């Protein structure tokens, strides 16, 4: 029986004739049950009254310019828990796999495998009864040269639309930053990662400039995407202002980022635009702690540091005594604090709406770990897909508009008196929301820039 089986190494090249993929490198993994194919821009559609799915693939690792547009009949949708712990809904397709001289139909899930070493994972279900694996070997069925690859994919090069885009951020290894860089390159733009701390500027009425390490002048950008961490808001916004002075389009303006970082000012702005928030009190150094607690409906209540982010500097005080202790402790540090009513019925859940260019492009429900009231992903919260109401969408869009943000993560909580706005984030993370919804949000950010330049 075994002589009829194909013998594979731990890595092999294969092809998918029906998808128009002439060759792709696969990790052969008998430890994985299901096969998975790298895919982005995944979208279901109806063809001849049947469910199909279309998607794009960069079949060659580390080459984002080579793109194949594929479509296949949709077999199923499954919830898969990714290695990072996010529950992800994946589309499942069936198509013919060609490996060596053999060809047979297999099922595969579609998922973004940019962070993986291989564009394709061949699991045991697809190999059952047909394959023997020799894990010590590789490429037993041969491998293409780089010239072969160029020839096979010569018609797949995507034409550049030519924008020069800078990502102004701190950490090039962060998931969100990597995805934005990839999405820009994927859509044919020239992407540059600009480390905020390595930029410096020349203030001059006639020739203002921004320099980069080594004296390189950064004056030829079409657009900048600011992703400024809270600890360097002042300098990051100063740089963004300088790019604005050079007439460079900034996806979020320096003014919008500055006001979104001031929790108190942003809440005042939102209220002025008719957006409901949990009842909130603010004091510089409360002499009357009792009245401050009473003002927001008594305990339990939330005490927040004005400068806190990602759930840090947020304390739940369950009793009046605890609330007094926390407020007095912060007061002794001369810290600016907000006190806010605790929405018990929210049950440690909130909704993150991702708004781009005045539209909610994705939404997730974030749920706190057991015993925790903060639902932030950074604190171990989990993300899942949720259908938001039209009222919640309206609040998210209104909040982003009030803050004048083109890109915003808007956090909403469901209370007994309806949806309430918690916070608006000017540099929302992509990992949780892309992982849970399988949507190309980084691509939507690039599209917002293209729209400004009337491209596509």
Image (cartoon, grey):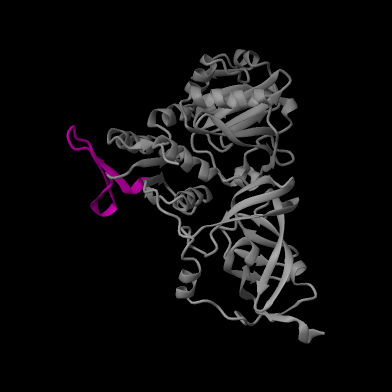
Instruction: From the viewer's side, name the closer residue of 439 and 311.
Output: 439
Instruction: From the viewer's side, name the closer residue of 271 and 95.
Output: 95
Q: Is residue 403 visible?
A: yes
Q: Position of residue 236 (x, y in %)?
A: 38, 38
Magenta stretch bounds: 196-219
Q: Is residue 428 magenta?
A: no
Which residue: 58% across, 61% down? 116
Where 124 sits versus 140, above or below?
A: above
Quarter of the image that includes the C terminus? top left
Left or right of residue 241, residue 395 in this image: right
Residue 125 lies in what quarter of the image? Answer: bottom right
> Hey, which residue is sitting farthest right in the picture?
1
Q: Position of residue 5 (x, y in %)?
A: 75, 81
Quarter of the image that includes the N terminus? bottom right
Q: Is residue 215 magenta?
A: yes
Which residue: 62% across, 61% down? 19
> Hey, which residue is sitting farthest bottom in the picture?
3
Q: Position of residue 295 (x, y in %)?
A: 62, 13
> Hey, which residue is sitting farthest front in the picture?
48
Q: Position of residue 454 (x, y in %)?
A: 41, 37
Left or right of residue 419, residue 449 in this image: left
């Amino acid at each position: 029986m075994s002589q009829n089986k194909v013998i594979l190494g731990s890595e092999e090249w294969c092809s998918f004739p029906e998808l128009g993929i002439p060759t792709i490198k696969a990790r052969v993994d008998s430890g994985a049950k299901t096969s998975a194919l790298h895919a982005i821009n995944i979208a279901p559609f109806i063809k001849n009254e049947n469910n199909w799915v279309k998607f794009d693939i960069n079949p060659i690792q580390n080459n984002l310019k080579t793109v194949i547009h594929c479509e296949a009949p949709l077999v199923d949708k499954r919830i898969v828990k990714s290695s990072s712990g996010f529950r992800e809904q994946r589309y499942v397709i069936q198509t013919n796999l060609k490996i060596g001289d053999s060809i047979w139909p297999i099922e595969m899930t579609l998922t973004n495998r940019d962070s993986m070493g291989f564009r394709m994972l061949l699991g045991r279900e697809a190999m059952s009864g047909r394959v023997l694996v020799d894990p010590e070997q590789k490429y037993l069925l041969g491998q293409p040269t780089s010239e072969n690859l160029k020839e096979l994919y010569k018609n797949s090069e995507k034409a550049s639309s030519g924008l020069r885009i800078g990502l102004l951020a701190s950490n090039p290894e962060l998931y969100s930053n990597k995805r934005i860089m990839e999405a820009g390159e994927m859509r044919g733009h020239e992407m540059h990662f600009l480390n905020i701390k390595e930029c410096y500027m020349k203030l001059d009425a006639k020739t203002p400039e921004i320099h980069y390490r080594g004296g390189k002048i950064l004056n030829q950008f079409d657009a900048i995407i600011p992703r400024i961490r809270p600890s360097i808001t002042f300098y990051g916004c100063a740089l963004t202002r300088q790019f604005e002075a050079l007439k460079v389009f900034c996806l979020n303006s320096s003014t919008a980022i500055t006001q979104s970082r001031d929790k108190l000012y942003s809440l005042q702005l939102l209220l002025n635009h008719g957006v409901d928030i949990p009842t909130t009190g603010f004091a510089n150094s409360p002499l009357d702690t009792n009245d401050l607690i009473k003002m927001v409906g008594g305990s339990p209540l939330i005490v927040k540091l004005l400068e806190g982010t990602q759930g840090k500097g947020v304390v739940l005080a369950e009793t009046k005594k605890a609330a007094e202790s926390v407020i007095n402790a912060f007061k002794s540090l001369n810290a600016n604090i907000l006190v806010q009513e605790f929405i018990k019925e929210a049950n440690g859940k909130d909704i993150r709406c991702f708004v781009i260019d005045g539209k909610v492009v994705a939404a997730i429900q974030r749920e706190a770990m057991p015993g925790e009231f903060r639902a932030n992903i950074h604190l171990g919260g989990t993300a899942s897909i949720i259908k938001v109401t039209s009222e919640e969408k309206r609040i998210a869009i209104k909040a982003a508009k009030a803050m004048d943000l083109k890109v915003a993560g808007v956090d909403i909580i469901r209370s007994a008196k309806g949806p309430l706005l918690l916070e608006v984030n000017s540099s929302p993370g992509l990992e949780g929301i892309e992982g849970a919804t399988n949507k190309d949000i980084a691509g939507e950010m690039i599209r917002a820039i293209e729209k400004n330049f009337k491209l596509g």
